[in-house]
Amino acid sequence: MKTIREAIKFVQSLVPATRTADANGTAVDTMGFNTACLIVNAGDIDTADGNETYAVNVEESADGSTGWAQVSGASVTITADNQIKSVEIPGLGTSRKRYLRAVLDVGGTSPSIPGGALFALGIAFTKPVTQP
């Protein structure tokens, strides 16, 4: 029996930080996995003006540096303090491009969101999964 650490690989895309503007996460190589899940962890968000918005989208690229395009339906919206949200991205190795990244889109008068985003890669072609 394998442990969860041997079955799932966790890769950070948006490092934990407080952000007040849009941000692109680092590219995550999905080679060798069949599925991915983006996990977004947010702290105390700024909603003081009432018009702030926070969304994290998944983008894909064939080479990890150019041609980024949003993955349809792969987005989460943060609407309250201290939320953890996730979205699954199926089709790795078939209908998806090789690289994924998290992209933070903020809006409003004074947006501020502490948090980060990571991918959990699963159903590996080779097990156990090697962790960095």
Image (tube, rainbow, N blue to C red):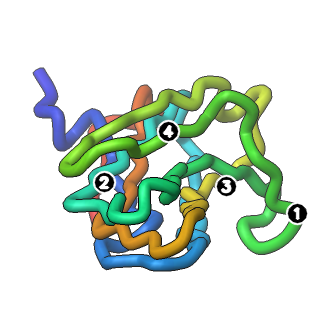
- Helix, strand or loop status at disc 4: strand
- Is 109 on the left or on the right of 129, as rendered? right
- Vertical order, 114 against 29 (above or below): below
- Is 131 on the left or on the right of 31, as rendered? left
Q: Earlier in the sequence, mark 4 or mark 1?
A: 1
- Structural distance between the alpha carbons of marks 2 and 1: 28 Å
Q: Earlier in the sequence, mark 4 or mark 3?
A: 4
Query: Label 3, on which residue?
Result: 99
- Amino acid identity at mark 4: Val
Residue 52 location (% of width, % of height):
49, 59
Residue 39 location (% of width, % of height):
36, 44
Query: Label 1, on which residue?
Result: 67
- Structural distance between the alpha carbons of marks 3 and 1: 11 Å
Which mark is nearer the camera, 4 or 1? 4
- Amino acid identity at mark 2: Thr
- Helix, strand or loop status at disc 3: strand
Query: Label 2, on which residue?
Result: 130
Residue 115 location (% of width, % of height):
30, 64
Which mark is nearer the camera, 4 or 3? 4
- Structural distance between the alpha carbons of marks 4 and 3: 19 Å
**Which image quarter is the N terminus in?**
top left
